[in-house]
Amino acid sequence: MSWSEFPSMSKSELRGLRKSIDQGFREFAAEYGESLEKFFDPLLSFLIFSERLLLSTPWPLMIAICASIAFVGSRSWKIVIGVVVAFLVIGYLGMWADTMRTLSIITVCTAVAVAIGIPIGILMAKSDRTQTVVSPVLDVMQTMPSFVYLIPVVMLLGIGKVAGMLAVIVYALPPIVRLTNLGIREVDSDVIEAADAYGTNSWQKLTKVQLPLALPAIFAGVNQTIMLSLSMVVIASMIGVKGLGQPVLKAIQNQYFAIGLLNGFAIVALAIIFDRVSQRYGMRIQRHRQGKSDV
Amino acid sequence: MSESNVKIHINNLTKIFGASPSSMLPLVEQGIGKGKLLEEHDHVLALDRVNMQLNAHSIEVIMGLSGSGKSTLVRHINRLIAPTSGSVLVDGEDVCAMSDKTLRDFRQRKTAMVFQNFALLPHRTVIDNIAFGLEVRGVGRTQLNEKSYFWLDKVGLAGLDRHYPAQLSGGMQQRVGLARALACDADILMMDEAFSALDPLIRSDMQDILLELQKDLRKTIVFITHDLDEALKIGDRIAILNQGRLVQQGSTEDILLRPADGYVRRFVADVNRTGVLRARSIMALKWQQEKAQNNAVVVQEDDTLRKVLHMMLKADSFNAVVTDEAGKAVGHIDADMVAQAVNY
Ligand SMILES: Nc1ncnc2c1ncn2[C@@H]1O[C@H](COP(=O)(O)OP(=O)(O)O)[C@@H](O)[C@H]1O
Ligand SMILES: [Mg+2]
């Protein structure tokens, strides 16, 4: 026996193994694919609804809405002007519709990630055992190359919006879960003791003490989730999600440098806007910690 | 002291921290002591068979060096810490036997706590911090507001209701902590080194505020400190812990004049006792007409030793007649008694 060659399974055994896994999954897909699709139907309608809504809103109104959200979030005129200019340029360069589609899927993905992620994070913070179980799962979700789980998702749900959205969520979910967990665990134990001493039950403790104090961390998680969803836009477009990713994909296939560049910049612009607004907002909600006046 | 006046019974309370606390109990029963248990068995004996009664309507000080078990002891009263053995009865009810729900109710209504590092909620304004206990209990808006603002005023923070804790100095933050506790209207107020983190002048202010409030409130206050001067100023009675054991519990004068052991003696060695001891506790009880000399000064039972000395020096006399409130002579003090009281 030579040490330079690893004693692996024989080729035919390996082929058998792969075949049986594939076979098993295919059967599973055939059996449950349809009911899974049914299960995700509400999500699909939500996606379609939000995309239609964004696309049908007159563009000046849309810009005004985005600018107001930016102002409420950041209280900074500089950022508001940045938002307006970015949208005007994007529109002028013919990327309005795709930008709205991307905006829509990012919003829905973030909403779903928050709705799932925060409760999971809370459960993790409440129990060490849950944390031990969930942590490695999150590691896998974040490090597994997306293409690998795109295969089963597409096999189950087919190409389309829902499959793309699931891919985005799998990738973007971990930070919000992790940071919710961390934020709650890092709440000062003295404050928790005080809450106990005044007789809070666990719901009161969660809503009146832990969540408010973990909010800055949770918000950092939301911010990261948004960034990660944006970074998945191109990959999601490979399985049929419309938006800024698709032109980029086309540009890669056909070597259209300019189209790739422009759409790439539009994605970057969205990312910067989301990031700045949410960062400013995050800073504002923890202002009481620095003891600044003006409420 | 009549039995009915006791608010909190602490019976044979032992608390051991470590991997297997209850297996250490037999050793503790044999009197192994904190040092040896840690060295040989790697368990911390935080409380060693403590028996103590705390009276209603009085300020009961628990004193001891850092690590002597004060915080652990007070946290047994509202079961923030559960005992390894022994029991705590509040108004005759066993705290350790309460269900979770009963315990929460008990904490909401019977006890309130003030912490050394304030433990305020940083995301809530002053007024919302004060309202916290009431809110947890489910008190309605109007009553909650009324009570919170009442206590805001009482602790001298009127006008600062919309500030955040981080905007206030340490002394003011602890006023918020005190108001939060008092707003709950609980019988028992537990203060774990509540003033220890404050500057001396502010600490003294807070002690005065507490004493002033206590005149009306007449709560059962369990006041923890490692500072003897504070203990003497605040306490109706003082209990002294050493290495998890109760070494003495008594009036301030008991502690000063009749220290139970060397530990207590060392504790009280440096204190300026002239400001604490009163004529009543150092005088010879029977006043005999013939012993009194004609230059004797007349002092009151309640006068401090400092005042007695002052009057004696002014009159160039070393004899004093002690009278009660009605002016009736009840005892006398001579030079020997003064000397003994000052240089215990
Ligand atoms: N959670 C804990 N785990 C282990 N040891 C503890 C714990 N809490 C307190 N102790 C130990 O118990 C003893 C008493 O502590 P504590 O009640 O905090 O003392 P004090 O308040 O008088 O300073 C100390 O030796 C301390 O180290
Ligand atoms: Mg302590």
Image (spheres, helix red, strand yellow):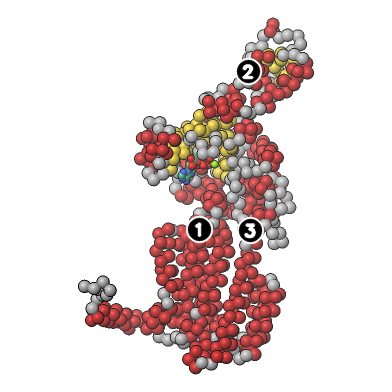
Does label 1 lie on the same chain as label 2?
A: no
The tag on residue A289 is 3
The answer to whether residue B343 shows anywhere in this view is yes
Residue most extreme to the top: B290
- Image quarter of the C terminus of chain B: top right
Alpha carbon separation for disc pair 2 and 1: 57 Å
Q: Which residue is drawn at 57% across and 59% down?
A: A213
Between the residue at mark 1 and the residue at mark 3, the CA separation in whole angstroms equals: 18 Å
Nearer to me, B26 or B263: B263
Q: In this view, does B140 lie above or below A68?
A: above
Secondary structure at numbered mark 1:
helix
In the figure, residue A280 lies in which quadrant?
Answer: bottom right
| Dot 3: element | helix
**Residue found at the far right of this picture:** B314
User: Residue B170 location, x and y as percent?
Assistant: 66, 48
Three-letter amino acid code at the position of disc 3: Arg
Amino acid at the residue labelled 2: Gln
| Coordinates of residue A45 in the picture (x, y in percent) | 49, 83
Determine if the C-beta at disc 2 is less than 8 A from ligand 1. no
Does any atom of ligand 2 lie closer than 8 Å to the CB of label 3? Answer: no
Residue identified by numbered label 2: B340
Q: Which residue is drawn at 50% across and 83% down?
A: A234
Q: Name the quadrant containing residue A97.
A: bottom right
Write down the residue under mark 1: A185
| Local crowd size for mark 3, using a 10 Å CA cut-off: few (<14), some (14–19), many (≥20) | few
Left or right: B24 in relation to B235: left
